[in-house]
């Protein structure tokens, strides 16, 4: 019996998704959002990516637990969403700073080889959708078989429109296996060039999914960009491990040159000793890079209108309305996107949805917080929602998961009143420990050391009323913390 090919899924979960603002924020980016795609709409894009790769296992492939490459700030989002799927990762590799995809893949290749194996890496972004999972699995298996022999294999999408938002791949004729040699890569074209590519029929969209052995990646990177290879190796050598979290050395990783996979390796492979091939992927693929792409994958009415949440659309065509917290109505619109969140609303020409990132850039320049966090902020212990605020007060609704607790902390500038709405609260208030249930309350004086915990088996919800001269989140002195923030 032929040995199965060891296959290592690698999910790239470190993007920011600025073009899907205001739903996507730096603190809760698009890959962790539920935006639709190939399955139950309760799955986030990240969860869909994890689940799709689980479908690879079979007679020919031995699929390992996934490696996740992500941002330090999103580590608990990754773990929480993996727990919902009941998936235990091989590791979560945490980038202390963003250095684009080439260093990220290098971390994954080094991790995959750390036990002496040389698996075939299946590298996929965490922010795409697929409607035909069996076709997706079949294409990836075909790519793994080719990559096992040392080839670099990428997946290409047959274009169905003159898209200017994707890079393109020019290929030769496919062989009997359906694997085609890659002749060159082309940057995102203008509209006229994209139309020509579509007419010529020998170009594919670059899906950003590629398959190759870990050793092949490291050799190719060492050949084309030895500076990235050496700097990432130095950061890996200085890594720290905390349960499933693996952290490369921060200062060393910050010194790694920032570069994409395509620029560092893929575009240099044609004509080099590293043979690069393409497998066609026809599986209802979509890269949800902007709101226009979300509209394309959404269910629509007879007028081409799509909606999520509490929305009423009248006498409109090809409109997307995404409502999260209130009724949104639209009348007489055409080719427009409307996205509502509790603290921000976007109205845009659907054809110009790629330009939403300009709004995010302006928010950043103005020092505003709407590009970073939602009004409802997720934390490893649960979440809080800032439902009202004024010059000297703020009201929050707080949820603490069963068995979780906030840090033992103190505030210099504010006092707090806590009212239990549901569940059971264990409250440390100075030298006292209280157990409060529904409709009971307590007061935390300014400067008092305190902690909120949920000892029960159901969610704890409280209303917190803050009052004081300064109410910022940075007015926290942590003494103990379950999540390493003290």
Image (spheres, rainbow, N blue to C red):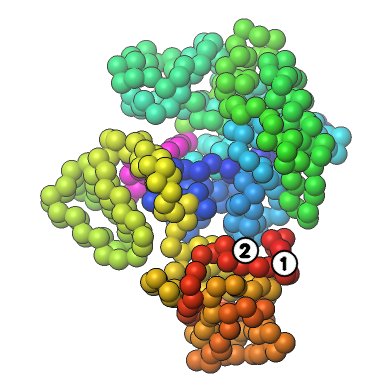
Decide which of tag 1 and tag 2 comes sooner along the chain: 2
SS under mark 1: loop
| Membership of 296 in magenta stretch | yes
Count neighbours of disc 1 (C-alpha within 10 A) and say few if under 14, some if 14 to 19, many if 20 or more. few
Whole-percent x and y of residue 244?
75, 53
Is 49 above or below relative to 40? Answer: above
Answer yes or no: do the residues labelled 1 and 2 have beta carbons within 8 Å?
A: yes
Decide which of 80, 62 is in the foreground and name it: 80
Residue 324: % across, % down = 36, 61
Residue 482: numbered disc: 1
Q: Is residue 151 visible?
A: no
Q: Estimate the spatial distance between the alpha carbons at disc 1 and disc 2, rounded to whole Å.
A: 9 Å
Q: Is residue 112 left or right of residue 444?
A: right
Residue 380 tag number: 2
The N terminus sits in image quarter: top right
Q: Residue at x 31, y 54 (%)?
A: 345
Q: Which residues are magenta?
A: 283-299
Task: Kindly identify the residue that appears in the image at 59 percent across and 33 percent down.
Answer: 100
């Amino acid at each position: 019996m032929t040995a199965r090919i060891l296959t290592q899924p690698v999910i790239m979960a470190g993007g920011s998704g600025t073009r899907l603002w205001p739903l996507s924020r730096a603190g809760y980016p698009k890959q962790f959002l539920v935006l639709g795609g190939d399955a139950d709409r309760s799955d986030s894009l990240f969860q869909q990516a994890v689940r799709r790769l689980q479908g690879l296992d079979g007679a020919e492939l031995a699929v390992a637990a996934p490696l996740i490459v992500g941002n330090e700030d999103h580590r608990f989002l990754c773990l929480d969403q993996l727990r919902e799927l009941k998936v235990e990762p091989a590791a979560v590799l945490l980038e202390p700073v963003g250095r684009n995809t080439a260093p990220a893949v290098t971390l994954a290749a080094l991790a995959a080889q750390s036990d002496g194996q040389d698996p075939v890496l299946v590298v996929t972004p965490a922010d795409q959708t697929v409607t035909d999972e069996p076709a997706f699995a079949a294409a990836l298996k075909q790519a793994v078989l080719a990559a096992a022999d040392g080839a670099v294999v990428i997946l290409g999408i047959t274009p169905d429109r003159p898209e200017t938002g994707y890079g393109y791949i020019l290929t030769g004729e496919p062989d009997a296996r359906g694997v085609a040699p890659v002749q060159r890569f082309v940057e995102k074209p203008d509209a006229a060039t994209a139309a020509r590519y579509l007419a010529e029929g020998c170009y594919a969209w670059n899906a950003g999914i590629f398959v190759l052995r870990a050793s092949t990646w490291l050799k190719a990177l060492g050949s084309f960009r030895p500076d990235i290879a050496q700097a990432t190796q130095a950061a890996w050598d200085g890594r720290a491990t905390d349960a499933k979290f693996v952290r490369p050395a921060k200062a060393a990783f910050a010194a790694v040159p920032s570069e994409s996979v395509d620029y560092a390796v893929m575009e240099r492979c044609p004509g080099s000793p590293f043979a690069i091939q393409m497998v066609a992927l026809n599986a209802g693929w979509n890269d949800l890079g902007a709101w226009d792409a979300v509209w394309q994958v959404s269910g629509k009415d007879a007028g081409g209108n799509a909606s999520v949440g509490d929305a009423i659309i009248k006498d409109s065509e090809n409109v997307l309305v995404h409502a999260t917290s209130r009724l949104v109505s639209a009348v007489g619109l055409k080719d427009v996107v409307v996205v509502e969140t509790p603290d921000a609303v976007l109205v845009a020409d659907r054809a110009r949805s790629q330009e939403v990132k300009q709004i995010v850039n302006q928010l950043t320049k103005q020092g505003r917080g709407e590009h970073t966090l939602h009004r409802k902020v997720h934390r490893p212990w649960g979440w809080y929602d800032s439902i009202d605020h004024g010059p000297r007060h703020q009201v929050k609704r707080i949820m603490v998961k069963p068995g979780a607790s906030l840090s033992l902390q103190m505030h210099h500038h504010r006092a707090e009143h806590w009212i239990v709405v549901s569940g059971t609260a264990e409250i440390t208030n100075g030298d006292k420990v209280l157990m409060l249930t529904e409709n009971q309350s307590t007061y935390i004086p300014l400067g008092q050391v305190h902690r909120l915990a949920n000892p029960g088996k159901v969610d704890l919800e409280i209303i917190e009323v803050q009052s004081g001269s300064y109410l910022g989140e940075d007015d926290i002195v942590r003494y103990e913390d379950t999540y390493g923030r003290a």
